[in-house]
Image (cartoon, rainbow, N blue to C red):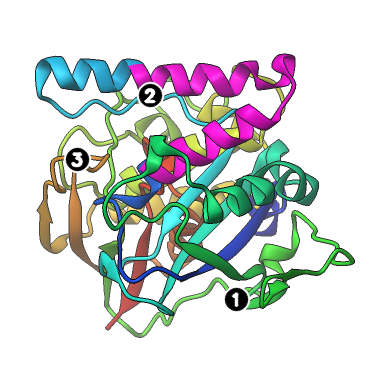
Amino acid sequence: MWDFISPISLIRYLVVWRVNGSLVQLPRYLPLELSQVLATLIAERLPAPQAREWRKTLEAWETATQLETKSGKKTIPTLAWPLESVLFAYPNKRAFGPGEVILWELKLIGNSADHGIFLELILPAMEQAATTTDARWSRHNGLWGHFDIQAIYISRGTRWEPIVTNGKLNLNYRASPTQWAEGLTLTADSARRFCRLTWLTPFDFEFAPADNDAEGNANNHESEIRKPRSRAPMLYDLIGALMERMTVFLPGKRRAASEVWTTLSEETRTTLRSALEQTQSSTRHRQKLTAPPRDWPGKWIGTQIFSDVPPSLIPYLEVASIIHIGKHTHLGCGTFRVDFF
């Protein structure tokens, strides 16, 4: 599977904020406000030419807010940061007292997987957000201006290495966009029959079947991988969404999932195709999916249990959970935990 993983450029930051106010009430879905506040602060620090793309993002948010005010319906723009990124808040409570910590993860992906970007753009905006008294974000028991950056870690495989400790930055740390995969063992226990997917954030997969496979043929199995229109995606739907997500690691701007297949070795393609064919006859044992709260992105959240999952598919599911799949990945949507029993 290495030929599938090796193109993935990714730097994962685990951010630890310690509350220094008497009480902090988080937004209902933290990444929504996190994205807007940090983007605003980044744009205001940049020269006008460099800030232009950031301001486009902020204008999209303003337009969405106006539409939501008029219609009363949730409107979340698909336009994300100019950086390919994910803001993933760990599931937790909403109210935090003094000294309690808030955990969230920033993922810089593809061409944006550059530690210099984090140091030059994102960390200064974070520091400003920690102490701001700006009236734009001032609200009763609000987060902004009421926390310290306690620590920040970068992943190396399954380990987290500190780059900020007790508020002090290690400027000598060198982060690689491939270290996230070092030592990872993406395997599954083939003796366990059932696989449970617990969606940690909502997902939204709405798109039609592909017209052609990697070789341009209409009827091969790759063309049958579709994004689900229903609320309960099957395993081959998840792999299809993963292939779409993998296009971010391809060169150029107009990229297709079929091109991802061409990057794989014949052995990998054959193994993956065989596993997907097996899923056509596997049964979904149980599902419990519901709509997320009204002001969250995405369409469905909950759990799914699959039986007789081909073990060779498990590493692909684990990769999907790391890089997120479907719509609104910038806001942390489309990730899950995989358990076996």
Q: Mark 2: few, some, or many residues within 10 Å (few <14, many ≥20)?
A: many
Residue extent of the magenta highlight: 33-62
Tags 1 and 3 touching, CB below 8 Å: no
Residue 324 seen by the camera: yes
Magenta span main SS: helix
Instruction: Give the Cα separation between the discs numbered 2 and 1.
Output: 39 Å
Q: Position of residue 230 (x, y in %)?
A: 15, 37
Badge 3 or badge 2: first in the primary sequence:
2
Badge 1 or badge 3: first in the primary sequence:
1
Q: Residue at x 10, y 24 (%)?
A: 72
Q: Residue furthest right?
A: 172
Dot 3: what SS?
loop
The amino acid type of the residue labelled 3 equals Asp
Residue 184 among those drawn in magenta: no
Q: Residue at x 57, y 46 (%)?
A: 269
- Horizontal side of 214 relative to 283 (left or right) equals right
Q: Which residue is mark 3?
A: 295
Residue 241 seen by the camera: no
Instruction: In this rendered view, identify the residue nearer to me: 140 or 69.
Output: 140
Q: Which residue is mark 1?
A: 185
Q: Which residue is mark 2?
A: 61
Instruction: In this rendered view, identify the residue nearer to me: 14 or 97.
Output: 97
Dot 2: what SS?
helix
Q: Would you identify the image quadrant in which residue 43 lies?
A: top right
